[in-house]
């Protein structure tokens, strides 16, 4: 019975050490991860996601701005359909 408690204590101490190490390394690692992320910033992107409106369990409306024009797209489980397309010139 004492071996069980001794093993449990060792596991809890090891877990505590791992958590403390994560908390110490995290402030230094986060800026590095932010610099290395794969997604481009909105500055250089021509496609901007304006908003997502969930309508049901698997149905949503997505409002996009592509090269200055507005698009509203309905997305469901089996289909994607453009509902509205801005025809006005944005120049």
Image (tube, rainbow, N blue to C red):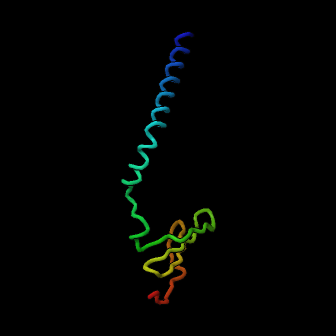
**Vertical placement of residue 64 versus 6, above or below:** below
Residue drawn at (41%, 74%) of the image: 46
Q: Position of residue 80 (x, y in %)?
A: 50, 73
**Vertical placement of residue 16 versus 73, above or below:** above
Residue drawn at (50%, 17%) of the image: 7
Q: Position of residue 63 (x, y in %)?
A: 54, 74
Of 65 and 20, nearer the camera is 20
- The quadrant of the image that shows the C terminus is bottom left
Q: Quadrant of residue 4?
A: top right
- In the shown orientation, is residue 56 left or right of residue 71? right
Of 85 and 44, nearer the camera is 44
Residue drawn at (53%, 65%) of the image: 77
Q: Position of residue 31 (x, y in %)?
A: 42, 50
In this view, which residue lies farthest toward the top? 2
Residue drawn at (61%, 66%) of the image: 54
- The quadrant of the image that shows the N terminus is top right
Marker count (numbered): 0
């Amino acid at each position: 019975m004492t071996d069980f408690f001794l093993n449990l204590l060792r596991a809890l101490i090891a877990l505590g050490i791992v958590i403390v190490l994560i908390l110490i390394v995290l402030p230094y690692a986060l800026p590095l991860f932010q610099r290395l992320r794969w997604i481009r910033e909105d500055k250089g992107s021509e496609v901007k996601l304006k908003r997502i409106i969930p309508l049901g369990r698997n149905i949503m409306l997505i409002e996009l701005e592509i090269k200055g024009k507005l698009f509203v797209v309905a997305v469901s489980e089996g289909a994607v359909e453009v509902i509205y397309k801005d025809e006005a010139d944005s120049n």
